Structure formats: C-alpha cells, structure tokens
Amino acid sequence: MARASSPHQFLGAAVTVALVVLAAAPSALAGDPDYLQDLCVADLNSELKVNGFPCKVNATADDFFSSVLAKPGNTTNAVGSVVTGANVEKVPGLNTLGVSLSRIDYAPGGLNPPHTHPRATELVFVLYGTLDVGFVTTANKLVARTISQGDVFAFPRGLVHFQKNAGDEPAAVISAFNSQLPGTQSIAMTLFGASPEVPDEVLAKAFQIGAEEVDKIKAKFAPKKS
C-alpha cells in the first residue's frame, strides 16, 4: 500500500516546484529589474533610499537562509488565515534576485481576503487541505476552481484574487512570486482602513451605501488601540 506523503515532504516539493518555475521564467517577464552582479545582500539598516535596497558590504550564508516557512502560522484572527513571508525583508540575500516565497495557513473555513500584488504574479502550491481559489479579470470575469494537495494555481500580477479553505481541516500553501517584495493590497483594508481615511462620501457612492454603513465598516478596520 502506498505511503501518504507528509506535510514536510510536500513543503520540500513546493519549494522545489516554485524555484524551478521561477528560474525558467524569461528575464523580460520578471517582476523586478535584472541584477548586474552575482549578489547584493540587502542592507536593511541603511538610510539610503533606492529602488530596492543598497548592498551590504560583507555577505554571509545566513543572509541567504531562513526557516520562517517551516511551521504553520497562527490563524486565530478575524479571517482565519495568516501569511508568512520569505521576502527580501526576511531573507536579505534575495535583494536584486527577483524571487520570494510565502506560506499561507488557513483555519477551517479560513479566508485570505480579496487582495492584489502590484509587483508580482503569484503561484501557489497546496501543501495540504482543499481550497476554493480565484481571481477577477479587468473585464470582471471570475476565474475560479477548487484545488487540493499537490495542485498549483496561478494568480496574474495585479489582479484581485482570493483563497478560502473549503474543508473542515486546516489547509496550507506555499506561494512563489517573481519579485523580491511583491507587495500586498487587501481591498477591504486598503479602502476602509487607510490613513488618512478615504472620505466617507467617496466610499458611500462607490459602494452605493449610506455614510452610517461606511462608518460601521471603517470601525472594523481601525487600528487596534494599545
């Protein structure tokens, strides 16, 4: 009888698939500019502001390493999901390399709410569980399906997309991006939690609701007071 794959085996397979796909992508399609040297480890403490990060003088192996994706994240929150990034801010050696990963964990019924990545296409690999996923084109067409362990699904750069755990058990995916820092804009948080606030009349007219409803929604996304 065939032996079931463990989550650790799937994690390793996910990273391998993601890196092979990203490495095969033409440089012209990369989300970030081409690099001009072997490496440019990000100096995250530099006060110099450039498009990316300035190079650190002395690089070490630790600059290219992280175990941040090894363990499930805490999904105890309002949406029942959590994203753990392995981007240039966590792995400085990714600076100028044009790739990064994330791990997304979902509680049963958990949702990664509609959002966009302005600087990258995303490819998810399902570690375990079953997810309903989809994106919306600029013609307002929903492209969606259900994916399960071992499946991959792509979300084109800049398009609004989501993932929802369709099962009654936890789920997790590994996401690959063709950018060292893809950026994320959650639609609800961006519109109702911006600072300074988006004017009530703008949101009321856009969503065809009253100012009172706008205030109620904004209250849900207001920064938590310590």
Image: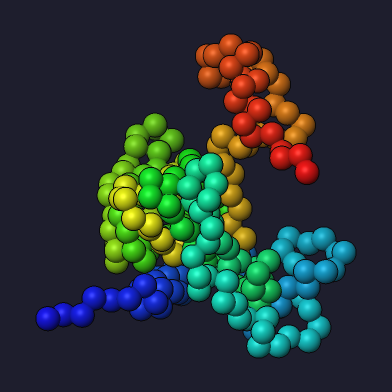
In this rendering, position of residue 17 left or right of residue 57: left
Q: Quadrant of residue 144?
A: top left
Look at the image and tell me whether residue 177 can be seen.
no
Please count the marks in the image.
Answer: 0
Look at the image and tell me whether residue 45 can be seen.
yes
Q: x, y percentage for residue 177?
A: 50, 62
Q: Residue at x 53, y 42 (%)?
A: 78
Q: x, y percentage for residue 170?
A: 38, 57
> What's the colour scheme?
rainbow
Q: Quadrant of the C terminus?
A: top right
In this rendering, the answer to whether 103 lies above or below 155 is: below
In this rendering, the answer to whether 124 lies above or below 217 is: below
Q: x, y percentage for residue 49?
A: 82, 60
Q: x, y percentage for residue 16?
A: 40, 77
From the viewer's side, name the closer residue of 34 and 196. 196
Residue lying at the far left in this picture: please name it.
Answer: 1
Q: Quadrant of the N terminus?
A: bottom left
Q: Residue at x 71, y 88 (%)?
A: 60
In this rendering, the answer to whether 70 lies above or below 139 is: below
In this rendering, position of residue 224 left or right of residue 167: right
From the viewer's side, name the closer residue of 170 and 36. 170
Q: Residue at x 61, y 37 (%)?
A: 189
In this rendering, position of residue 89 left or right of residue 84: right
Residue lying at the far top in this picture: please name it.
Answer: 210
Q: Residue at x 38, y 45 (%)?
A: 109
Q: Quadrant of residue 218?
A: top right
